[in-house]
Image (spheres, grey):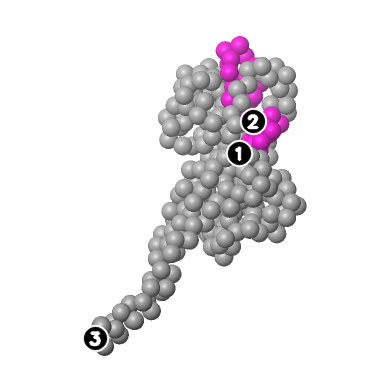
């Protein structure tokens, strides 16, 4: 090989590691509560845009918080856990999966009713769901979903749990409960405002705010994170001014 070509080849080879590093894809694997889906998708786009790093991508996996926690205990490779409550996040810390939890938002439970529903939830509260005209009520499974537990607590507080128990249709996540509502399979659904505000549900019915405390939602940067620096950076973005503005558009309140 001619000396000039040899030097060019050597230079090209020396650049390979740098080029590979520059083009390296560094995903932030996020285990996220189903209720967070609309907001997290917008948060991810905004974070990637603000960072301007073509190699960084937020890659979410959505599910019921309890089901995701079970996956984490089995060694699922996530960088960040964004639960729909504090209890599950704290359990993750207690199990040694992360060092601390941080509340990133306060969510609200609402009663969603399809268009044309005569259930007077606005006037009578959840007692209206005991009426015979309301035959099926969707909630997330309280065993695995924080908003399912919030729905059960709200129904018990209203004194109608025993009256509506046989009407309940349980989704394996709050997203599935919302799907039942959108499909017209139920006469009411107790879901977070973040899902009731989606175009599909907003067009198909009305959401009635409910009394009661908000649901505090926490995140944990995981000890086994492949990219802990990026996970912390994304969580900081969520907690920052722009992140909170996005969360507010999706029905969340600041912690």
Asked if residue 193 is among those painted magenta in the image, a careful observer would answer: no
24 up-or-down from 151: above or below = below
* Residue denoted by label 1: 64
Residue 18: image location, x then y, percent = 41, 74
Asked if residue 136 is among those painted magenta in the image, a careful observer would answer: yes
Q: Secondary structure at mark 2?
A: loop
* Residue denoted by label 2: 141
Residue 2's tag is 3
Residue 115: image location, x then y, percent = 46, 22
The quarter holding residue 167 reads: top right
Give neighbour class at mark 1: few <14, some 14-19, many 20+ (Cα, 10 Å): many
Q: Secondary structure at mark 3?
A: loop
Q: Nearer the viewer, residue 77 or 236?
A: 77
Q: Is residue 217 shown to the viewer in this render?
A: no
Give neighbour class at mark 3: few <14, some 14-19, many 20+ (Cα, 10 Å): few
Q: Earlier in the sequence, mark 1 or mark 3?
A: 3
Left or right: 134, with 150 as reference point = left
The quarter holding residue 152 reads: top right
Left or right: 14, with 124 as reference point = left
User: What is the magenta range?
Assistant: 124-153
Q: CA distance from mark 1 to mark 3?
A: 63 Å
Camera-near label (1 vs 3) is 3
Q: CA distance from mark 1 to mark 2?
A: 9 Å
Camera-near label (2 vs 3) is 3
Where, quadrant-wise, is the N terminus in this rendering?
A: bottom left
């Amino acid at each position: 090989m001619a000396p000039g070509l040899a030097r060019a080849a050597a230079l090209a080879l020396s650049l390979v590691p740098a080029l590979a590093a520059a083009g390296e894809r560094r995903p932030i694997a996020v285990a996220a509560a189903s209720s967070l889906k609309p907001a997290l998708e917008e948060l991810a786009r905004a974070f990637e845009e603000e960072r301007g790093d073509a190699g960084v991508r937020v890659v979410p996996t959505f599910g019921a918080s309890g089901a995701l926690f079970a996956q984490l205990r089995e060694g699922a490779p996530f960088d960040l856990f964004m639960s729909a409550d504090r209890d599950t996040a704290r359990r993750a810390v207690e199990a040694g999966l992360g060092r601390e939890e941080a509340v990133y938002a306060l969510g609200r439970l609402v009663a969603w009713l399809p268009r044309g529903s005569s259930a007077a939830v606005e006037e009578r509260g959840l007692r209206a769901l005991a009426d015979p005209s309301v035959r099926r009520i969707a909630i997330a499974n309280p065993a695995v979903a924080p908003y399912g537990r919030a729905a059960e607590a709200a129904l018990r507080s209203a004194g109608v749990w025993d009256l509506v128990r046989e009407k309940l249709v349980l989704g394996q996540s709050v997203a599935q409960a919302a799907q039942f509502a959108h499909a017209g399979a139920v006469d009411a659904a107790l879901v977070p405002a973040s899902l009731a505000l989606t175009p599909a549900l907003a067009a198909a019915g009305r959401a009635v705010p409910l009394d009661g405390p908000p649901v505090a939602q926490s995140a944990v940067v995981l000890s086994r994170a492949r990219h802990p620096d990026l996970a912390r950076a994304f969580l900081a973005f969520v907690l920052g001014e722009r992140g909170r503005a996005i969360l507010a558009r999706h029905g969340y309140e600041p912690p």
